[in-house]
Amino acid sequence: MPEVLKAPLVVEFPFTRSLGPVQSAFLTGLRERVVLGVRTGDGRTLVPPVEYDPVTAEEIRELVEVAPTGTVTTWAWNHAPRRDQPLDTPFAWVLVRLDGADTALLHALDAPGPDAVRTGMRVRVRWAEERTGAITDIACFEPYDGGPYDGGSAEPADHTGEFEDMVTGIVAAARLDYTYSPGRAQTAYINALAERRNVGERCPSCRKVYVPPRGACPTCGLATQEQVEVGPSGTVTTFCIVNIKAKNLDIEVPYVYAHIALDGAGLALHGRIGGIPYDQVRMGLRVEPVWTEGARYPDHYRPTGEPDADYDTYRELL
């Protein structure tokens, strides 16, 4: 059996969102070294604050200030910090119920080792030197030997939530690093693509040929083993015209992305259509792959010059 492929994969994108009045006040408060919560109708104080009561679904807007000190309610030791985590040395993830709050806030605790952490220990906020209006304005928590709050009352105090230059939106970089393995069936498919061939697998029951192969028929639930070479030509079953240029993609808009049913395949795969004006692409257009030097997959598909396929020959593949 050939070796199954695997490779590191990174999915990353900036996530941009606007903030409502509650989250805006909370993040702006952190920038000003103030921790805000929200008071529910039955008197509970939620930190971090939310806009709707998780119990009653009632909208809540009454902001209160709580202490920067609190108590660890539970924890887990992180012996190998990852990129962009709060600390670059081993630390504890902790849930901290700040003095005056009824719920706990998740953050990092700077401690010399797991033996120095315990449920019930007292901690306080360590503020970041540079603060911008983000949860990272709390650099971490640190052990604290004082009482409920040496700086004043532990009871939450009413707060207007008003600051100068309010934070109204955030951009968070979402990133997922993992190792992907396509499995036996798709490994064979990828290796065949390197030879400029399209290889699928046929279901032993319904006889449908899946390209790319999945290792099992999703309709019948049976394992697929019989390899079938399809294409290279195919038929456009449906398509869309792309008018927005993607970042880091060197393709001029507008262009066409289509579902293409390769000859002999039981379902359509997708690919870009080139070699024809975008407004002349149509359902039933016969196309063939175009490869670039050293590529492991087709760069795009272009018209073959054949007559369009009859609708009845591909309608089941839409």
Image (cartoon, rainbow, N blue to C red):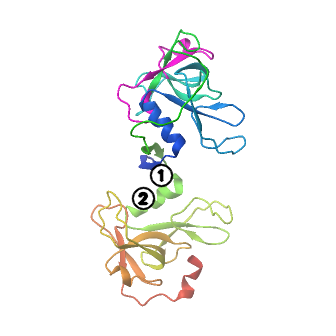
Q: Nearer the viewer, residue 196 or 89?
A: 89
Contact between labelled residues 1 and 2, with CB atoms less than 8 Å apart: yes
At 47% from the left edge and 13% from the top edge, which residue is drawn?
A: 112
Quadrant for residue 165, please give it.
top left
All told, the count of numbered labels is 2
Q: Position of residue 306 (x, y in %)?
A: 39, 88
Q: Secondary structure at mark 2?
A: helix
Q: Nearer the viewer, residue 245 or 211?
A: 245
What residue is shown with label 2? 191
At 42% from the left edge and 69% from the top edge, which residue is drawn?
A: 271
Residue 81 vs 251, above or below: the answer is: above
What residue is shown with label 1? 2
Q: Is residue 303 visible?
A: no
Amino acid type assigned to the residue bearing label 2 in the image = Asn
At 42% from the left edge and 47% from the top edge, which residue is drawn?
A: 9
Q: Is residue 120 magenta?
A: yes
Amino acid type assigned to the residue bearing label 1 in the image = Pro
Magenta residues span 109-138
Quadrant for residue 206, please give it.
bottom right
Residue 79 located left or right of residue 291: right
Residue 86 located left or right of residue 50: left
What number is the disc on residue 80?
Answer: none
